[in-house]
Structures are given as structure tokens and as C-alpha cells.
């Protein structure tokens, strides 16, 4: 029997009831799945359908960029977080409807490129919500990546700018704050097994009214973190920087009018869309592919496949991420598709088209395809505190297929580098400082990653992180004033740890850290690449090496220095090989280490890695090989073994005839080792991953995904992925020890 049809009045009452009693405002899929700029508003259409003065646009654009530069500099000069001091921040301007238009010329583009999601959430859900609203003088805070962000350590302040009663643009500032009250200090907990271990998870909410921070909400946020001083100071810093930016834009409006601002922002976006379509049309139609493999969940070793296929057809580009590993229900390295797309965008801005304006319009012509419930398209309830593991890959993985697509172009827009070192290799710390302050954060060492080689020259040493070319390293003296951490070996280039090639990568640097002056201090790391190279090569080069975390425990190095400092050389290889401290325990570990308390004087050592090499090593100019030896970047044995260069060991003069002979012999040896492709496939490939390999992702068919469920391998359809549940590593170790004990008995 059919139910009676409701009258319009009854339907309106029902709609109102449902609207007013919505259980929870989670992320809106309609917003989160859309990375493109929105259509013109009627007012934009009216303005742009008339005469547009390009000179006026250029003038206004320059004023906006100058204002953003000033706001960015204010945050960097006044911010308390390590990320603020060393450039992990940004100031940005958005259209009135929330599309990212421009960022400061030296900010982190990804921090801004993800903010259109929360701004559009605010406009859709809070603007007409009677208990919230959006008014002049309001400001909104946000850090939950599920609503649009990189990861939850980044906090943003977003302010609508009203002009004559309506919003004409949005302004924002963002800082990687670090500490956010998670289960481990520093804000990036490898130990998080659910999203409830992640600390602050702020959807966009109003924290500023009448241009003042609400003290009750500020107190709530301070009460939720280990470092309330940091939370207090940087909320004020972000607000006052965005208010200065507001002043500059208001002066622009007074001088040039709202029409000039709106036309500039919108035409800026549309010009970029047209240019990107033109550049895509230049590329050959076809598909290029790339796979990357993080080697750890940060709790156990596992080979996690990240699969990318880039297809060009006409003026459209499709980025297909199907076949990647499934999401992990109780590991923190998942990310969501909005975050992943944002960081792929960051990689394009740094490595593919760095000459384009940093606006999300760059990705409007691009399509993305993901498997549901993959590591890259994680569900709302999966932990994502260490999403940096797939996200760092996102920033470099596209370099390989795009370099192949661009290879035949008569004109290129940059020299695409082989993937640079793409891991957050840094110490995350927490405890009481020498000033008795409770802190937790990270060192800014990830801002000096080794660059990959290029088509015309070697990569730069420790040049920048993959997320922003303008970030800087921390000043050691300043860090040691604030923290008990002591650097016994810092920023020393790591000899021989190179991505070899016709043009080698840049080197990373070693870090040897300890602490003193604190009775309660500890470290953690959140990085992969200890077993499988993190940096892939291009066109026949070598990938970068794998790097472990090395520890020397059970000693106080400061006491050892008092007795015989001459026996200690602060070099990782020397310390681990010669073991100068008789009573110490030496260990090599994966670079994924959950937080552990340390004792004063114990050593924690790691290497900021190298990028991938570019081109065949046998094509490298012998003079460049000798130069690397002279600069102590490479050992003589490596020059002979890898590059096949003969030289006098005392004078380093190249024997050109012997070098030519050695290289020709190596080419013949390669041909002797080689097989026709079909024969190679028969001997090399297997129908499925070896049972001994904890492998996650597709093998030979992207429609079939392998995973690990409670220690057992499973096969799944890519159309119906299951969330993977991982055993607690301590439980696994206990079971192994119990089995050994039972066998011994």
C-alpha cells in the first residue's frame, strides 16, 4: 500500500527538521572529490564578458603578490614552531567562492592548495547556519586533513574579506605547527592505531570573532596539546599576518575597485587552465607508468605498492592510481584522495611546470582515478597521522612518467630531475627542555633532501624538501638554545651515498644527535627507505641507497669525550664499524621508530638521503668522476667499480685509454648478461608475490590486490578492497620468543 504523498508544507517541515537535526557534518564527498576550480559566478561572467585591461590585471596581480610576500615573511619572522622558522608555511588568497588563486612567492604550495576544501565547506555549511554564520571579522581554524589538508600537524587560519557587505575573497596563513596532542609528541605519531590517537582533529570552525581570537576556544586548544605556549603564540601569529594581508587587499580595493580584484583573480585562474591544456596538447598521446614502494608501515616491514599511470589524450591528462596497496585499518600511514592529489600537484609545481603560477587551476584539466579504500584513498575512519609516507612519494613519483612524456618535446619548461630523496628523515622529539618546558615537535632536517640528477648536470646537495624549493635548514645554535638536543655531526655530506648516473644525484647529509640537560627526553622517527631505495633513477641511472637508523645506547658520549676525545670520529660508518665505546650497544634499525625515551649522551644517527641518478654511468665524463673524488664525495674504489674509470691513485690523472677499454668491456659484459625481453620475463616474473615477501598492492593485474590481514596474505578484488588489520609488533615478538622458549625446553 502506497504511503500518502506529503503536502508542500509537510515536505518543507520534514526538510527543515532533517537539516536542523543532522547528526554529524563530516567531510562532504562532493567537495572532497573535486580538485577543479569552480565555474564563473554570474558577477564574474558579467565582468569578464566586457573589456578586460591586461595591464590593470598585471598591476593588481603584482600588488597581491607583494601583499602575500609580506604576510608570509611576517609568519616566518614571528612564528614559534620550527616549521615557521624554516619556511614550512604559506600565505594565500582565494576567490570569493574558495578557489586558490595565488600564494606567496616562497611558501609551501601544498598547504594552500588543500585549503579550498575547508573554505568551500565553510561556505556550504556554516555561512547560513544560524549558530555559526560567516561575518566580517570572523576567522576559521582547521587542521584535519580529512576536511582538506596535508596532515594534522598543519594548522590554518582562514579569513573572509568583506567589501561593501559581500565576500570578495578569502585569505589564509598556514604553519606546520608540529605538536598537536597526539599519542606521541611532535604531532606525527607512527604508533597511532586509530584516528583517535592523532590528537587535535579540527574541522573548519570559527575561532575568531570581531578580529579577536575567542579566549575560550583558544584555552580549549591549548589544553589539548603538550605545548600550550606554541599553540597560543602561533594562533596569534597566523591571525595578525592574515590581518596585515587584509589591510593590503583593502587598500587595493580602495584604489582599484572590487572589479579589478575579482577580474584579476578569475582571469589568473582561467589563463593557467588554458596554458596547461596547451602544454598537455604538446605531449604525445599515450601512457607511461611508474611504481614506488615504501618499505615499512612504520611499525613493521612491508613492501607497499604505489602505482601510477599517466595517460595523455588531446588536451586531457589522466592520472590513474589503481593497483596501489589497500588501506591499513590500524596503521597511521593512510592518506585521503584530496591530500594525495594536493601533493601530486606540489610535485608538478616543483618538478614539472615550475614556471606556472602556483594555483590549483593547474590541475583543472586533469582527471584522477583511485581504488576505493586504497592506501591513497583512505576511509574517513582510518588513521592518517603519518600520511607523509605516501604523500612524499606523491611529490616525486610523477617525475619519471612525465620525463618520458616530455623527452621528445622541442621545448621543455624545466630540466626534470630524477626523483629526489622523498622521505621525512628527521628526529621527532618530546620531553622537558633544559628550561623545564614541556615540548614536542620535529627538527627541520627534512628541508635539505638530496636532489636527483638532471639531463644536463648533477643534482644539488641537500637542496630542499620535495614540497617546497624555498624552505631552509634550521640554525643549530638557535635550536640548542631552545632544546637539549646537541648535534655532534650535522650537515656533513654523506660520502658515497649517491644515486649514480651520467649525472649523479646530490648527496644527503648525516645527522648525529644526542641530548643533555634534561631528565626526561625521547626521540622517534617516521621514515621508510631502510631496505628498499626511496629514490628511483631516470634513463638508466642508479637509485639512491637505502638508509638505516643507527643507535649507540648505554653510554654517555659527553663522559667519553672527557676521557679520550681522539678516539671518536663523528662519522656514522666509522662509529658503527669501529665501535669506539666499549660498553655501548650498537644497533641498526628501520627508519620507522615509535617514540622511545633516551638517556643523556646516547647517539641517534641517520642520513638525509640522496636522489636518483640520471643516465648511464658509463657515459659520465671521467673528469666529473675525479672531481667527486677530489671533493670527498666519492671513494676511489667506487669510481672504478661503478663508473669504470682508470686513474693514478696518487695524482688522480685519468688513464683515458684504459678507461675506454674498461667501459667497452663492461658494455660487452652487459650484452652477455642480457636476454631477449620474452625470455627475461619467463625467468624473472612469478605468478604472485613470493610467500616470504610481505607485499601489498597489485602484482601483474591491477584488478587483483594482495594484502596482509592479521599476519596472513589475502587476495582481493580492486573493486572491493578490505581494510587491512595489522598485528601488534609486540605481540608478534612475544609469540616468537615463546616459540623459541618452548623449543628450548
Image: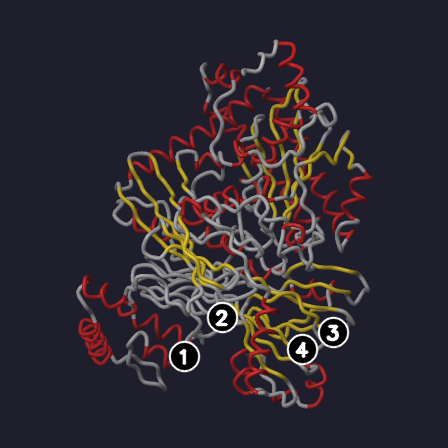
Which residue in the structure is indicated by mark 1? 635
Q: Which of marks 2 and 3 is nearer the N terminus?
A: 3
Q: Earlier in the sequence, mark 1 or mark 2?
A: 2
Of 413 and 120, nearer the camera is: 120
Q: Earlier in the sequence, mark 3 or mark 4?
A: 3
Which residue in the structure is indicated by mark 2? 547
Contact (CB < 8 A) between labels 3 and 4?
no
| The N terminus, quarter of image | top right
Q: In this view, does 438 lie to the left or right of 129?
A: right
Which residue in the structure is indicated by mark 4? 602
Q: Which of marks 1 and 4 is nearer the N terminus?
A: 4
Give me the C-alpha separation between circle 1 and circle 2. Answer: 18 Å
Give me the C-alpha separation between circle 1 and circle 4. Answer: 29 Å
Instruction: Confirm whether residue 156 shows in the render.
Output: yes
The crowding category of the residue bearing disc 1, from other C-alpha atoms within 10 Å (few below 14, some 14 to 19, many at least 20), is some
Tell me the SS state at disc 4.
Answer: loop
Q: In this view, does 585 lie to the left or right of 521?
A: left
The disc placed on residue 516 is 3
Amino acid at each position: 500500500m502506497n504511503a500518502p504523498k506529503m503536502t508542500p508544507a509537510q515536505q518543507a517541515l520534514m526538510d527543515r527538521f532533517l537539516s536542523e537535526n543532522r547528526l554529524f557534518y563530516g567531510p562532504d564527498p562532493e567537495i572532497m572529490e573535486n580538485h577543479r576550480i569552480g565555474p564563473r559566478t554570474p558577477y564574474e561572467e558579467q565582468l569578464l564578458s566586457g573589456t578586460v585591461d591586461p595591464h590593470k590585471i598585471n598591476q593588481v596581480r603584482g600588488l597581491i603578490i607583494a601583499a602575500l610576500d609580506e604576510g608570509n615573511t611576517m609568519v616566518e619572522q614571528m612564528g614559534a614552531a620550527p616549521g615557521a622558522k624554516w619556511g614550512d608555511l604559506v600565505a594565500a588568497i582565494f576567490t570569493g567562492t574558495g578557489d586558490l588563486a595565488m600564494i606567496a612567492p616562497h611558501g609551501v604550495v601544498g598547504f594552500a592548495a588543500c585549503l579550498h576544501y575547508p573554505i568551500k565547506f565553510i561556505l556550504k555549511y556554516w555561512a547560513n547556519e544560524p549558530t555559526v554564520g560567516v561575518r566580517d571579522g570572523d576567522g576559521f581554524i582547521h587542521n584535519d586533513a580529512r576536511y582538506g589538508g596535508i596532515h594534522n600537524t598543519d594548522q590554518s587560519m582562514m579569513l573572509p574579506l568583506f567589501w561593501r557587505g559581500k565576500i570578495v575573497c578569502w585569505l589564509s596563513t598556514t604553519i606546520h605547527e608540529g605538536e598537536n596532542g597526539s599519542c606521541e609528541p611532535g604531532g606525527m605519531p607512527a604508533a597511532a592505531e586509530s584516528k583517535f590517537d592523532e590528537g587535535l582533529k579540527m574541522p573548519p570552525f570559527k575561532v575568531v570573532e570581531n578580529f579577536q581570537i575567542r579566549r575560550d576556544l583558544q584555552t580549549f586548544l591549548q589544553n589539548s596539546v603538550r605545548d600550550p605556549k606554541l599553540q597560543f603564540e602561533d594562533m596569534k601569529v597566523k591571525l595578525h599576518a592574515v590581518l596585515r594581508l587584509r589591510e593590503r587587499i583593502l587598500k587595493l580595493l580602495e584604489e582599484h575597485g572590487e572589479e579589478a580584484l575579482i577580474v584579476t583573480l578569475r582571469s589568473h585562474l582561467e589563463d593557467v587552465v588554458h596554458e596547461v591544456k596547451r602544454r598537455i596538447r604538446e605531449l604525445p598521446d599515450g601512457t607511461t607508468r611508474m611504481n614506488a614502494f615504501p618499505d615499512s608501515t612504520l611499525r613493521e616491514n612491508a613492501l607497499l605498492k604505489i602505482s601510477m599511470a599517466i595517460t595523455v589524450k588531446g588536451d586531457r591528462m589522466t592520472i590513474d592510481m589503481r593497483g596501489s596497496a589497500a588501506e591499513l585499518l590500524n596503521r597511521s600511514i593512510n592518506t585521503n584522495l584530496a591530500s594525495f592529489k594536493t601533493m601530486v600537484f606540489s610535485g608538478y609545481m616543483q618538478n614539472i611546470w615550475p614556471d606556472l603560477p602556483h594555483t590549483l587551476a593547474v590541475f583543472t584539466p586533469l582527471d584522477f582515478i583511485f581504488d576505493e579504500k586504497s592506501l591513497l584513498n583512505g576511509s574517513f575512519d582510518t588513521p592518517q597521522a603519518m600520511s607523509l609516507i605516501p604523500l612524499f612519494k606523491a611529490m616525486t613519483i610523477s617525475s619519471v612518467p612525465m620525463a618520458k612524456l616530455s623527452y621528445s618535446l622541442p621545448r621543455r619548461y624545466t630540466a626534470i630531475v630524477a626523483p629526489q630523496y622523498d622521505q621525512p628523515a628527521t628526529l621527532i622529539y618530546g620531553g622537558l627542555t633544559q628550561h623545564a618546558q614541556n615540548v614536542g615537535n620535529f627538527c627541520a632536517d627534512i628541508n635539505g633532501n638530496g636532489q636527483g640528477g638532471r639531463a644536463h648536470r648533477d643534482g644539488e646537495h641537500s637542496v630542499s624538501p620535495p614540497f617546497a624549493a624555498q624552505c631552509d635548514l634550521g640554525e643549530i645554535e638557535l635550536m640548542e638554545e631552545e632544546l637539549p638536543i646537541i648535534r655532534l655531526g650535522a650537515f656533513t655530506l654523506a660520502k658515497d651515498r649517491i644515486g649514480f648516473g651520467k649525472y649523479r644525484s646530490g648527496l644527503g647529509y648525516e645527522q648525529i644527535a644526542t641530548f643533555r640537560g634534561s631528565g626526561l627526553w625521547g626521540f622517534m622517527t617516521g621514515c621508510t627507505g631502510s631496505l628498499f631505495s626511496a629514490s628511483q633513477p631516470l634513463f638508466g641511472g642508479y637509485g639512491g641507497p637505502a638508509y638505516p637508523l643507527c643507535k649507540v645506547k648505554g653510554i654517555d658520549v659527553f663522559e667519553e669525550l672527557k676521557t679520550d676525545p681522539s678516539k671518536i670520529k663523528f662519522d656514522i660508518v666509522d662509529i658503527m664499524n669501529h665501535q669506539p665505546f666499549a660498553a655501548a650497544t650498537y644497533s641498526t634499525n628501520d627508519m620507522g621508530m615509535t617514540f622511545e625515551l633516551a638517556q643523556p649522551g646516547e647517539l641517534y644517527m641517520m642520513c638525509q638521503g640522496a636522489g636518483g641518478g640520471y643516465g648511464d654511468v658509463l657515459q659520465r665524463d671521467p673528469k666529473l668522476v675525479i672531481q667527486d673524488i677530489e671533493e670527498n664525495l666519492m671513494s676511489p674504489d667506487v669510481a672504478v667499480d661503478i663508473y669504470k674509470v682508470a686513474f693514478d691513485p696518487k695524482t688522480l690523472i685519468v688513464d683515458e685509454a684504459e678507461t675506454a677499454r674498461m667501459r667497452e668491456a663492461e658494455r660487452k659484459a652487459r650484452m652477455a648478461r642480457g636476454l631477449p625481453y620474452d625470455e627475461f620475463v619467463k625467468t624473472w616474473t612469478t605468478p604472485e608475490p613470493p610467500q616470504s615477501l610481505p607485499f601489498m598492492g597489485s602484482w601483474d593485474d591491477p584488478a587483483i590486490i594482495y594484502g596482509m590481514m592479521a599476519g596472513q596474505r589475502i587476495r582481493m578484488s580492486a573493486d572491493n578492497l578490505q581494510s587491512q588489520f595489522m598485528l601488534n609488533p609486540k605481540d608478534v615478538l612475544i609469540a616468537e620468543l615463546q616459540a623459541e622458549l618452548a623449543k628450548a625446553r
